Amino acid sequence: MKNKVLIILLVVFSLLLAGAIGFGVYLNMNFSTMIFEKGLDKLYTLSNDTLTKANIYDYENEIVQINNNVSYSSSDEVKELLGLDSVSLNYNITLDNKNRKMLNNISYLESDKEYLNVDLLYNSSDYSYINLNNLFTKILKVSLDEETTKSIEDMFDTILDNGKTIKDTDRLIYLTIEIIKNNINKEDILKKDVTITIDGKENKLTEYCYSLEGEKLNNFVINILTEMEKNEEIVNILKNTYKMEEVNLVEYYNDNYKYNETDKLLSSIYVSGRYDIVGFSMNEEAEVGNTIIKYIGTNDSYLFELNNNIDTNMIVEGNKDEKDTINLLVKNNDEEIGTVKVIEENHEYTFICDTVDNAMSITLKYKNEKVSDKENNINIEVGIVSEGVSLGIIKYNQNTKVVDKLEEFDYSNVVDVNELTEEDTNELFMNLQEQLGDSVLYTLIIGYSSQFDASNYSSMY
């Protein structure tokens, strides 16, 4: 009895061992393909996140207000030179695509004093209305010709199409990646252990390189394009969204992009440990020239390389220090041209860029803040120092949100611009001069006008 039990256990153990070995062989043969599929999925996730953030508003059914502000605050040196403390330009637009209405507001300020404030209203008619606010007591009515009206209506159509285009683009990328995954041949994937040195720090990684050349490379591309042509959903996207009359992808590729027999395409995915994808690279060795694009971010080390084998061999590399600041060195053709520091705090990113000779320093701050599902803020700030002298700070702020309605201004007191009297014209220009007279903007306009008149006068003789 004991012998029978022992024999049974030995048989079961042998079967389990054989199964484990077989599964191990199978896994080893298909692991490279799995890595590439995972890498493609990661790239799709990056593109999907970007497109999703760009498509959070329903322009077809919602009224969206976009408030933009660009401001410049001068340094003491610039203020002494120009007598200008700060300049601010606001451009706000409210879009009611459903009712084909648009309201624009433009205002201009210097040192917190408002010099200009203009409203422009388009409300699906043959006219636009302009409210000059404190420059003129009447509302101006501007007749729109057929071409202008069509361009505005086309703009509404484009805005409406953008949401659909973003969704269709995301779907197109997904479907194409799935086709690529189905055409990956594990026999063309080369696996090797590599040591990549980034800013003096060694990183031991595994590289999975998909190597194709000549006829095999062309067949790979043609197989993908052929499947795309056979996919009804892809064809519909290309025709309806991208306005392609005929989807002849293979024919277009053969006529314009077909590789030569000696051309190679090496696509690599870099893995840390067993599963952690930390980098990508593409190396195209073509008759017209070589191109290398590589990015690796692992173990607090970062490397970006762009080489077109003509005039650009840019390498950006560095490490994260104990304060979580990323310090990067920028080189082009082996020549150090500058440094970049990247600091992240409370979802705000600060980039400090210095030339290697410290002749110029640029500090850029960026923050994208989601206030709610219906409101978003973008803040960008740029400071420039040249030869040790501050040139001031430029700020850009954008607030985008859904509003209940488009607030039209009262245009009952209206006059057609073609029917303005001499008295109206004089009032307008006198108010314009009085309102803008002490502004830098007015000085620049007068100076430009004088220069333009002088150039015209001289060209007559």
Image (cartoon, rainbow, N blue to C red):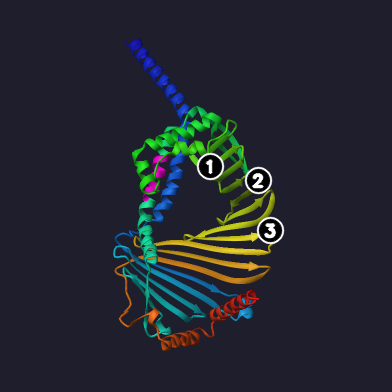
Residue at the disc numbered 2 = 310
Q: Quadrant of residue 160?
A: bottom left
Quarter of the image for the N terminus: give it.
top left
Residue 235 in the image: state x and y as whole percent.
37, 41
How far is mark 1 from mark 3, CA to CA? Answer: 28 Å
Is residue 273 visible to us here? no
User: Nearest the camera: 134 or 381?
Assistant: 134
Where residue 117 sits, quadrant-wise, is: bottom left
Is residue 196 within the magenta segment? no
Q: Please, what secondary structure does the residue beneath circle 3 have? A: loop
**Which residue is at 46% across, 67% downward?**
397
Q: Position of residue 312 (x, y in %)?
A: 64, 48
Residue 175: in magenta span: yes
Q: For mark 2, give the secondary structure.
A: loop
Q: Residues within 10 Å of mark 1 (few under 14, many from 20)?
A: many
SS under mark 1: strand
The magenta region covers 167-176
Mark positioned earlier in the residue sequence (3 or 2): 2
Q: Amino acid at mark 2?
A: Ile
State whether residue 90 is above or below residue 160.
Answer: below
Badge nearest the viewer, 2 or 1: 2
Distance, label 3 to label 2, CA atoms, is 23 Å
